[in-house]
Image (cartoon, rainbow, N blue to C red):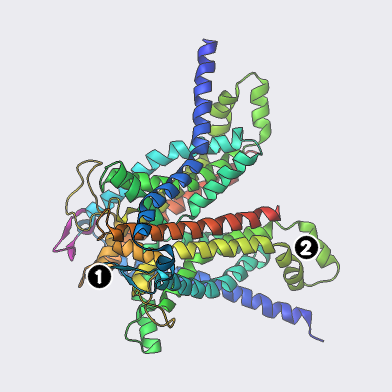
Amino acid sequence: MKNPYRTQNIAFFFLFLATLLIVIPVGLIVVIIIKKGLPAINWQFLTDIPRQGMRAGGIFPAITGTMYLVTGAIIFALPIGLLAAIYLSEYSKDNLLTRIIKLAIVNLAGVPSVVYGLFGLALFVVFFKFGASILSGSLTLGIMILPVIITTSREALESVPYSFREVSLSLGASKWQTIRHIVLPSAIPGILTGTILGLGRAAGETAPILFTVAAFYLPRLPDSIFDQAMALPYHLYVISTQVPNVDEKIRYGTAFVLLTLVLFMNLVAIIIRYKFRKKKKW
Amino acid sequence: MCSMRKFKEFIIEKLILICGLASIFFVGLIFLFLLKEGLSVFKTVVPFKFILGKSWYPISEPAQFGILPLILGSLLVTLGAAIISIPIGVACAVYISEIAPLKIKEILKSGIELLAAIPSVVLGFIGMVTLVPWAKQLFHLPTGLTALSGSIMLAFMAMPTIVSIAEDALYSVPRNYKEGALALGATHWQTIYRVLLPAASSGILAAVMLGIGRVIGETMAVMMITGNAAVMPHSILQPVRTLTATIAAEMGEAVVGSEHYFALFAIGIVLFIISFAINVTADLFLHKKQ
């Protein structure tokens, strides 16, 4: 008869191996980009415009473009997402409508990013005639990150204990006063986490901005929200596949800046969540 | 004073309701605009020939819009990614939820989140400089831009989804199932294999489906690694082109309102329907569990 403990050891070894198969490549990806990208980073690279057909100079317009896009997306998505989360956590009843809303959120999160690009092109660029512009790109990205913001904010709101609401209501506060002064303040760290995760997602996406905003090569800063702009992820795509003979250093440097930006936001979100969990009073 | 406040609250509550409905509105809007632009292609191309046509020559004269090679390209890459990511992802979820000590568990979970956060264009770039030359050398191919390279890279994009949802499913199995099995003398592994995994099966199935959904919709990494040859795929060691990559690569050149433009939107409809079907089914599985 087989020894069940030996089987267990073998099984656990393979489970551990599978975990390593995920964790080691992730580590390697980050290490490769840091090792090869960090030497490319200097003040000029971060603050200069691209020169000689993107084979020299810096990536400043791409960094600025991404900042504009991310800011625009969050201005659009945060209010709608937060109010939607309030609806789901405080007002909705357990009925068919709520079920459909939740299903819609799941689907919104699952729509392929390139389909968002098509949608942004059809609605904002062509139908509303915003053209390929920061405005079109921001709105497209904003709709894309809506599910992230709704889901995380809702979790934050729902984790506020029910007794908090009962006390406030029993003291004569109205439902909205309770939400505004009791529930929301307690949920702010969670909402912040969701917002930052949404920012990180918007900063890294390429496909939704391909046809709605991204300029192949625009060695200046955009003038208004109706102007095209460069963006970091698209710039990385362009210099690694569309432009021949780009110095490897520039490619790795761009990848490094993009990865750092996105991972930094995620790190901040993780830290906020961690601290909040520790400090939680209930 | 009081009625003023009541009025203000009435407005705010209506606003909250409207925003609550926004998700439904946006999903509808996306589908509507895809249909509005995409259906026009069927004025000139029969739907049957669009789906099953074997040649995609959008700019030759006369243009041919058959997306079968693209569908097969997507399927091939997705199948490869699924074969790699499902066993590894589920195994990792079991390890994290059942075996890893608490400290290591937190670190591993952060690592998985990290992987999920890496932008696809960065993964595509890394694939180009590592996987592609490696595949070329290993199999003595004229190019390393193949379906296989794409599958491996995509497997990494599916894993965070699979791991985190499968881990949730395992975690939510009632504790007394596990305690019961252990009390009957089963080893920890027997408990996992015979009790926890079957109990969490519908959640794990949902995890797998959502992971696959992520792979089918993935665009940038695929476009950078799979070589973009819109031909009928014969082997996993050849360049292929997926549905998503076709849209991303060609929309920039398509003239707004041209047949090519409409055809790319029609591909968008196909992608939207696939992702919708996957998400709704996965959601059903997740709810069955509760």
Dot 2 corresponds to which residue? Answer: B178
Q: Are marks 2 and 1 on the same chain?
A: yes
Disc 2 vs disc 1: which is toward the camera? 1
Please, what is the three-letter code of the amino acid marked with disc 1? Ser
**In the rendered structure, which segment of residues is drawn in magenta?**
A45-57
State which chain disc 1 sits on: B
Q: Nearer the viewer, residue A134 or B176?
A: A134
Mark 1 surroundings within 10 Å by alpha-carbon count, few (fewer than 14), some (14 through 19), many (20 or more): few
Dot 1 corresponds to which residue? Answer: B60
> Is A280 situated left or right of A57 in this image?
right
Q: Secondary structure at mark 2?
A: helix
Compared to residue B119, the image places residue B139 above or below, namely below
Identify the residue at horizontal 66%, vertical 39% (top origin): A94
Label whose residue precedes the other's in the sequence (2 or 1): 1
Q: Quadrant of residue B124?
A: bottom left
Query: Distance between the Cα atoms at labels 2 and 1?
Result: 63 Å
Mark 2 surroundings within 10 Å by alpha-carbon count, few (fewer than 14), some (14 through 19), many (20 or more): some
Q: Secondary structure at mark 1?
A: loop
Q: Is residue A47 magenta?
A: yes
Q: Is residue A117 magenta?
A: no
User: Is residue B107 visible to the viewer in this orientation of the structure?
Assistant: no
Compared to residue B279, the image places residue B54 above or below, namely below
The percent position of residue A23, horizontal first and vertical second, equals: 51, 69
User: Is residue B198 visible to the viewer in this orientation of the structure?
Assistant: yes
Please, what is the three-letter code of the amino acid marked with disc 2? Lys
Identify the residue at horizontal 65%, vertical 23% (top origin): A169
Residue farthest along the right direction in this orientation: B184
The percent position of residue A241, horizontal first and vertical second, equals: 27, 69
Residue farthest along the left direction in this orientation: A52
Q: Nearer the viewer, residue B200 or A116?
A: A116
